[in-house]
Amino acid sequence: MAERVLVKGTEAIGEAAVRAGCRLFFGYPITPQNELPEYMSKRMPEVGGSFLQTESEVATINMVYGAACTGRRVMTSTSSPGFSLMQEGVSYMAGAELPAVLVNVVRGGPGLGDIQPAQGDYWQATKGGGHGDYKLIVLAPSTLQEAVDLIGLAFDLADEYRNPVIVLADGVIGQIMEPVTFPEFRDPDTLPKHDSWALQGAVGREKHVVTSFDIDPVVLEKMNFELVDKFERIESKEKRWEEYKLDDADVVITSFGTIGRISKSVVEKAREEGIKVGLFRPITLWPFPYERLEEIVKGKKLVLDVEMNMGQMLEDVKLAVKDNAPIAFYKRMGGMVPTPEEILNALKMELGR
Amino acid sequence: MAMQIIQKKPESLTDKEFTYCPGCTHGITHRLVAEVLDELGIREKTVTVGPVGCSVFAYQFFNTDATVAAHGRAPAVATGIKRARPDLCVFTYQGDGDLAAIGTAEIMHAANRGEKITTIFINNAIYGMTGGQMAPTTLLGMKTTTTPYGRNSNNDGYPIHVSEIIKETKGVAYLARVKVNTPQDVQKAKKAIKKAFLAQLKGIGFGMVEVLSTCPTNWGLDPVAALKWLDEHMVPEYPLGVFVDKVGDEQ
Amino acid sequence: MTTRIIFAGFGGQGVMLMGQILSLAGMLEGKHVTWMPSYGPEMRGGTANCTVVMSDEEVASPVTEKAEVVVAMNIPSLLKFQDDVIPNGFLFINQSVIDRDSNRTDINVIKVPCNEIADELGNLKVSNMAMLGAVVGGTDIVSTDNLFKALEKKLGSKASMIEINKQAVMKGYELAKASLVK
């Protein structure tokens, strides 16, 4: 078995990307994710890749667009305000069907906010963020091992569907250290070449064009329909989630990312007090696992959604739960991270205990 | 008796008909770029990065792999392509709104990094595609749809001299301002464009050619008058010349 | 079993490093472990702190209100975290800097003269290692074997420092063992 190593979250994400065959990284400094570009600036030259510190997140995402046009694996990382700046380029990439992995280490907002862990970018990530009809695959890790695994998956999904994939982390995931096992280095020869569409020089073939643009509405609508077909394909195939102690549970906690793991401690503590609680943790925030959540909550006493935002995933939870169970919501914001103890107290209040 | 072809369309242009207005000099510059790509034998390794603006359709006209960048971001997109595939030749084709207004940061930093890409910068002192609004390069006193009383420096600032600013950055390997309103100027422009590509191909640094261009439609002139207007008004504000040449003489 | 340890002190007292070395030792011991640096309001007030959660099972919450072990390297840290120790838990006090007692009587309090130990060894920089040794001596949370391995891994490039760090660890370790016997 491969060696376990103790690494910081940002480093885990960076090394996982390198192992997945990423040889191109563009980034602009913003807290709390600076160790990731720093790591890549050291690592890229070691593996024959290219690292560039850009003049802005606007430039960053367009460099990612350019690199992705060649069919090579490319990644960037940023934090909330930086991701807002990238939205134009993200929309273009979705329209042009370009594969890339975008890491957002979410911090407190809106505006400048602060540099502490938060989940306030859920809507931006899952509902669009930029202009036009598009979806991004959104993966939310809750541990560093999961972050490592999801980075590999993110590149594979990006390539398979020719679509940008977001890894939505937060300051906790970015800053903690945990032992992880890295996968082996991906053999570059096994990576998708994208020869059928990528810009690699029109040698002995018709030219390739990569664009999100067509002036003719008849043609553009056709492009739109094709995108929708793709998104429906992703919805039918790529929903991922974790179920934890749900079989005998009376109460279902729904939460993602860092709160997802904190909620596991709540489950344990509640059970010590005789309250049967289980956890449903979406791993793909888009596509959201509506059907499975609906199935699970039938006959439950309570669904408690817990987030570090004003109730963003709550909307999807409501869409899934419908009137099958009462829903309560507990939130912290502004970079405040709830402890298991306070979530348990909130849960007991809801149950009238 | 065999017939001899003395002139033909460059291979680096597609059969697609240009969509530019009558008298617009975009078409001339397109052809010059295509001739240079042919002469350098690099069509098959070239990627065109088109802009947003009148030349948004450039991706259809150049017979190379191509993409369209977001408004102003072509130098960043070209950087991404070049970093991923240093073996390719990458050029951006941008207008003055794209390059000198919304894309100021991207062009400045691409030049300063000495990014090994080539930029063709069309300066016609006006926004064409959106309907004749003021460009950053619009001349003082010039009437546009957003300067109906003429560009007023007190309100609108001054015509921006991108080449004069960029020439100070150390990464630039070739930089010239040319015009294409007479046959002689067309020949000079082609030489400049070739050098701007050679700057990239030889790995020296960033190459750019600013092409003073006409916009009869939005200037409100007929094509011939527009060619003359360019000499009378554009050239005094934007003097022609080679600002940087680290490429040296060919062959 | 899950053990939560809070290390707190001034920036520069090597608080983060203590937590990281212990985490590494825990990993070498085959345990699940999470190290988390100070976050949110914890960062205010000039104290640096980190939390280590070590467990036989996968670590769920890296965030905690209570801890089995608190290490206070300075007075603000003592005042801030002493109430977080669970009954019968451990509070380690850096006696060289903290001139007062804890208000807790339901926990194990172990005082460590970190600076004096380091001074005796001839290098003040190893005072945090004296404390780390005491933590391991007092709680047996990892073996000294794995602690030394972690130390060597972490200080790899400063091989000359390893011996004196180990000595500091052992001094703290023995002191903690002795004070528990009392």
Image (cartoon, coloured by chain):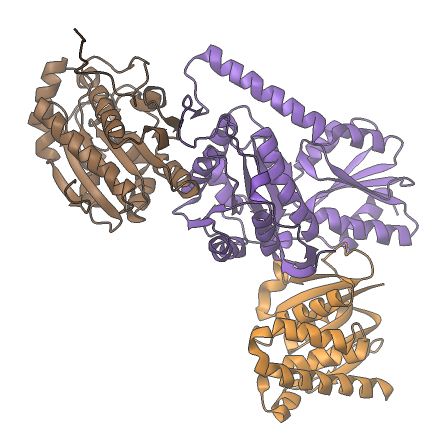
Residue A155 drawn above or below residue C178: above
Residue C79: x %, y % from top left: 69, 73
Q: Quarter-wise, where is residue A157 in the image?
A: top right
Residue A92: x %, y % from top left: 47, 29
- State which chain is coloured brown: B
Residue A103: x %, y % from top left: 56, 44
Residue A142 drawn above or below residue A282: below
Q: Quarter-wise, where is residue B76 in the image?
A: top left
Viewer-proximal residue among C11 and C145: C145
- Residue lying furthest top: B1
Position of residue C80 in the picture relative to residue B144 (left or right)? right
- Residue lying furthest front: B1
Residue A284 visible in the shown view: yes
Instruction: Look at the image and tell me in which quarter the N terminus of chain A lies.
Output: bottom right
Q: Residue at x 74, y 64 (%)?
A: C27
Q: Residue at x 68, y 72 (%)?
A: C150
- State which chain is coloured purple: A
Q: Residue at x 16, y 35 (%)?
A: B177
Q: Residue at x 75, y 38 (%)?
A: A241
Viewer-proximal residue among B55 and A282: B55
Residue A125: x %, y % from top left: 59, 36
Position of residue C81 in the picture relative to residue A54 (left or right)? right
Q: Colour of chain C?
A: orange
Viewer-proximal residue among B169 and A68: A68
